[in-house]
Image (cartoon, helix red, strand yellow):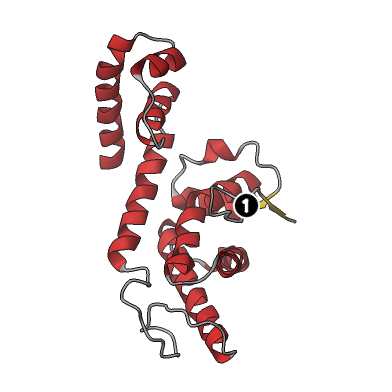
Amino acid sequence: MWTSHARQNEKEQPILSLQNKNSSSNRMTLSDENLVLACRKGDESAWEALVNRYQRLIYTIPRRAGLDEDQAAEVFQDVFATLLKKLDEIEQPERIQAWIVTTARRLTWRLISREKSRGGTAIYADGGEEDTALEVADDAPLQDEVLLQLEEQERVRRAVYAMDERCRKLIQMLFYQPVSPAYAEIAAALGTTEGSIGPTRARCLQKLLRLLEN
């Protein structure tokens, strides 16, 4: 029932999904609550959208705690396996992000504890909630401010995805590439003139701000 996507970016992040991903893009603008409710009804595209929405955030938690890519992949897989089992038990579907983050942290702590008990390479994690006392390296854990930043980035990404195609493409070309292309290249891609890029950029940023405010 599970399938694996191609690994993502240079980090080669594994992605869990259910089959039939063709309609998942239509679900990306839904709220977390609506996605969870759709998943409960067996909507495979909703599950795909939920995985895609939080894959980067989940993967970052074990990596920031010092785990290697394979260990982070294990945490990632376990988070969604746990979610699948407990999907109907979640009392606040609108707070699924908090549930996912908490689960990822706990699974990270458990994996670190298990590795330490085996005498593996020393790694670090946040302490406090788990029953094992783990030393914390100042620069290793996923600090709350870093987590908030990641969550904010995810919120912006979802807002960009909800924009009309023209604005979404312009924002992605301007802000989501290592080097912003020249206006001539952008104009050619959008089928417009170079002189219109500036005003269009301003309008699209205003639309984005309204989406974020809502």
* Point 35% across, 62% down: residue: 147
Q: Position of residue 14 (x, y in %)?
A: 61, 56
Q: Position of residue 182 (x, y in %)?
A: 36, 21
Q: Is residue 33 left or right of residue 71?
A: left
Q: Nearer the viewer, residue 94 or 161?
A: 161
* Point 43% across, 16% down: residue: 190
Residue 209's place in the image compared with 67, above or below, is: above
Q: Is residue 32 visible?
A: yes
Residue 183's place in the image compared with 178, above or below, is: above
Residue 126 found in image quarter: bottom left
Q: Residues within 10 Å of mark 1 (few under 14, many from 20)?
A: few
SS for dot 1: loop
* Point 57% across, 90% down: residue: 119
Q: Is residue 89 left or right of residue 156?
A: right
Q: Nearer the viewer, residue 130 or 99?
A: 130
Q: Nearer the viewer, residue 39 or 176?
A: 176
Residue 25's place in the image compared with 147, above or below, is: above
Q: Is residue 99 visible?
A: no
Tally of numbered tags: 1
Q: Residue furthest right?
A: 1
Quadrant containing the N terminus in the rendered view: bottom right
The residue identified by callout 1 is 41
Q: Position of residue 57 (x, y in %)?
A: 45, 57
* Point 43% across, 59% down: residue: 97
Quadrant containing the C terminus in the rendered view: top left
Question: Mark 1 belongs to which amino acid?
Answer: Lys
